[in-house]
Amino acid sequence: MNNLPQRIWQVTKDLLILTKYRITMVAIFTGYAAIAVHGQYATNWSYIWPCMIALFALGGAANTLNQIFELRKDAVMDRTKARRPLPAGRITPAQAYFFATVQMVLALGIFIWFYGSYLAAGLTVATVVYYSFFYTLYLKPRHYLNIVIGGVPGAMGPLIAWAAIANTIELAPLAMFTVIFLWTPPHVWALAIKLKDDYARAGIPMLPVVKGVDETTRQIFIYTVVMVIGTLAVPLLVPAFEHSPLYTALSLVLGAVFLVWTAILWRYRPIVPTMPLFRFSIIYIAALFIGMVVDSFVAGGRP
């Protein structure tokens, strides 16, 4: 009995690890950013919070299935074999399947019965199927550009949140989706260089494993160029972002830092470590979306 609180805490911690809660929080934050840009419900928290829960449950379901399917790979990777509850034996696959099902039902229930949005529900199903089945089971084990094509699910937060509150897909959330999609490859590859031996041990053909660090740093720079151009094009091409001074300034300044950093990384490979760039990339995407939110409040929302 004395160990009951400790066991409860461990189970709670393990369930959160199954959801990959840090990654899932990105979907919540970017989803809220889309609601703020939409404007009508930006501060109506009684209306917003169910959507945030649904986004977390959606991400949690997809990530739980991902860890079930990658159990054997996680068991041989130093980064995951002790930390994740499935390879460590703290949670069984059957329990994880049940947990994923509960999360999926919760997400769909909120989008259908609270918001009445079958569009958001359909995007939810598509996201889980894409990430958990197509990406995890088919794409990731087969191609070194897996993360480029596989970046779609991680960018779906704005689209699903917008669909929940407006029951439509418009240019503004598509632009937000594109920003995240373009950001994903340089972000993930910076980490993949650090973990390339782990990926090789697990037989996962990530870019640094298949093409080496030299080619990966070159690709990071190329994709960063595309990403920065894409972020700078948003205010020019999307009416909802025409008057976004903070977002524009952040995309210019932080984009320049990102470009210079990746150019130095490519030039002096493999001497320059990539983990600081990985951490900066998180600050970068967070700052851009904070800029979107602040600009939307200053402008009074954009229906």
Image (spheres, grey):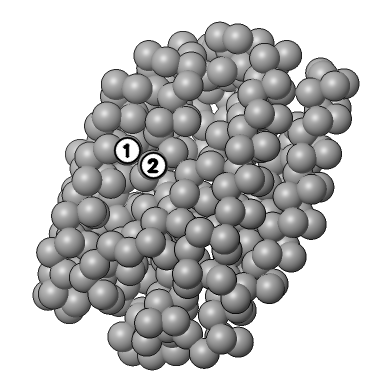
Q: Which residue is mark 1?
A: 131
Q: Position of residue 286 (x, y in %)?
A: 62, 60
Q: Which type of secondary structure does the marked residue at label 2 adopt? A: loop
Q: Position of residue 216 (x, y in %)?
A: 65, 20
Q: Residue at x 47, y 21 (%)?
A: 145
Name the disc covering residue 8, or none: none
Q: Nearer the viewer, mark 1 or mark 2?
A: 2
Q: Is residue 200 left or right of residue 123?
A: right
Front position in the image: 165 or 114: 165
Choose top left, top right, bottom left or bottom right for residue 69.
Answer: top left
Q: Amino acid at mark 1?
A: Tyr
Looking at the figure, which quarter contains the N terminus? bottom left
Q: Residue at x 39, y 23 (%)?
A: 140
Q: Position of residue 64 (x, y in %)?
A: 33, 43
In this rendering, is residue 299 above or below 183?
below
Q: Is residue 4 left or right of residue 47?
A: right
Q: Which residue is mark 2?
A: 152
Looking at the figure, which quarter contains the C terminus? bottom left
Q: Amino acid at mark 2?
A: Val
In this rendering, is residue 284 above or below 153?
below
Front position in the image: 239 or 105: 239
Dot 1 surroundings within 10 Å: few (below 14), some, or many (20 or more)?
Answer: many
Mark 1 touching mark 2, by CB under 8 A?
A: yes
Front position in the image: 173 or 233: 233
Front position in the image: 291 or 187: 291
